[in-house]
Amino acid sequence: MNVSSILNQLIGQASGQSAGKGSSSGMDVSRVVDSLSSQLKGSSGSTGGIDLKSLLGGGALGLMVGSKRGRKMGGKAIKYGALAGIGVLAWKAYQNYQSGSGPDASQGQPIEQLQGQAREQRGLEILQAMIMAARADGHIDANERAVLTQEIEKLGADDELQAWIQQQFEAPLDADLLALQADSPQAAREIYLVSAVIIDDQNPMERAWLDQLANALKLPPTLTKELDRQVLEPA
């Protein structure tokens, strides 16, 4: 499966880079800030939020995070920039949690440092987490699923990956089963972080999913708070 290529393009959609075949350029972080500023200065008739489908320019990632009916993210829309450095931010959160501890081989490597099959496996874990988070409020219907499948196909997913993605749409939402996919403590942190990026933490169902996942991944509350902070303040 060519999961690394697809994941790289999804990340590109969040960081404003070209996402490849037939898809849009994705989210430009500076444009998000400009949109937020304009809305804050706008008329009293403003809707009070930002349309993620517009900001993300459609595409697979835009559909994942914008499929929630009526979702508006306001100032937190900027958090999608965190996708550009999933592994680095997850590792930074761990270092802060451990008060600046040095390298620890038992923790595993950030996804950005992995190569070959190890990177493909971690990519599957991350993509599975993204799909589960997108489904957490139960609002991806058959039509949205079909469009999302088409958008992922545009990114160049091979037949094997397409079949795997369909399985993820049909599988029960099971935080324990998703947690079992983590191949290291670093993978667990990345799974949580990418899920925190996708979910709307103001939605009780989505927040409940993230809390279940944190428990299943056996992440201490202090560490999850640090991961949440990294998501909201990507740097």
Image: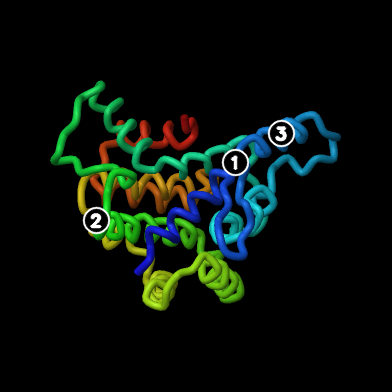
Given contact means CB atoms under 8 Å apart, are the residues at marks 1 and 3 in contact?
no
As rendered, which of 174 and 113 lies closer to the eye?
113
SS for tag 1?
Answer: helix
- Name which of mark 1 and mark 3 comes first in the sequence: 3
Is residue 37 shown left or right of residue 93?
Answer: right
Residue 28, given in percent of the width and then of the height, sits at 62, 42
- Name which of mark 3 and mark 2 comes first in the sequence: 3
Residue 137, given in percent of the width and then of the height, sits at 51, 59
Nearer the observer: mark 1 or 3; the answer is 3
As rendered, which of 132 and 22 lies closer to the eye?
22
Given contact means CB atoms under 8 Å apart, are the residues at marks 3 and 2 in contact?
no
SS for tag 2?
Answer: helix
The residue at which mark 1 appears reads as: 77
Rendered image coloring scheme: rainbow
**Is the residue 166 above or below the residue 79 in the image?**
below
The residue at which mark 2 appears reads as: 118
Q: Tell me where residue 167 sits by quadrant.
A: bottom left
Q: Which mark is residue 34?
A: 3
Nearer the observer: mark 2 or 1; the answer is 2
Looking at the image, can residue 21 be seen? yes
Given contact means CB atoms under 8 Å apart, are the residues at marks 2 and 1 in contact?
no
Structural distance between the alpha carbons of marks 2 and 1: 31 Å
Q: Residue at x 59, y 56 (%)?
A: 62
Mark 1 crowd level (few <14, some 14–19, many ≥20, 10 Å Cα): many
As rendered, which of 23 and 176 lies closer to the eye?
23
Looking at the picture, which amino acid does disc 3 mark? Asp
